[in-house]
Amino acid sequence: MFGMSFGEILVIAIIAILFIGPDKLPDTMVKVAKFFRSFKKSIHEVKDSIEQEVHLAELKEEAISYKEQLEKSVDEIKNSTNINVMDDLTDGFDDIKDSFTKLDETPEKLPETEPVTEITEKPAKKSTKKKGKKKDV
């Protein structure tokens, strides 16, 4: 039972009979058996509780690792999206900047033209088409 031999158990039984007495010995044995049963039940409950806590701790660690993986994936997606948007914006701004620099550039020298010295006025031609017949009143 507890690593005791038959001789040791017999000695304990004889001492119990001498101290407790033969009339109270059966009740005492029942109480001792109930104590060991409740003690064994308590140990089993503690063992189950510890196993449950260990299992909960494992589940918690697993949930935390999944959460970290999910957050990492979300951050990667956000960063890639922000980079793409920023790249597009900077490309657009660079194109606009290039367009303005091309507009600001002036040709080195414009071809020279002769100055206009004589202005002639030509009268406007009258239209020969009649739009409709109108009588002067």
Image (cartoon, grey):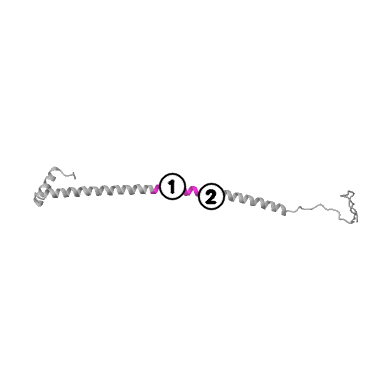
Residue 37 shown left or right of residue 65 in the figure: left
Most foreground residue, 29 or 81: 29
* Residue furthest front in the image: 137
The quadrant of the image that shows the N terminus is: top left
Q: Which mark is residue 124?
A: none
Residue 81, given in percent of the width and then of the height, sits at 55, 48
Label 1 sits on residue: 66
Residue 102 shown left or right of residue 46 in the figure: right
Q: What secondary structure prevails in the magenta region?
A: helix
Viewer-nearest of discs 1 and 2? 1
Q: Secondary structure at mark 1?
A: helix
Query: Is 7 covered by the magenta stretch?
Result: no
Bounds of the magenta segment: 60-80
Crowdedness of circle 2 by 10 Å Cα count: few (<14), some, many (20+)?
A: few
Q: Secondary structure at mark 2?
A: helix
Quarter residue 106 falls in: bottom right
Identify the residue at horizontal 51%, vertical 48% (top origin): 76
Residue 17, given in percent of the width and then of the height, sits at 9, 49
Label 2 sits on residue: 79
**Cα gap from disc 1 to disc 2, whole angstroms:** 20 Å
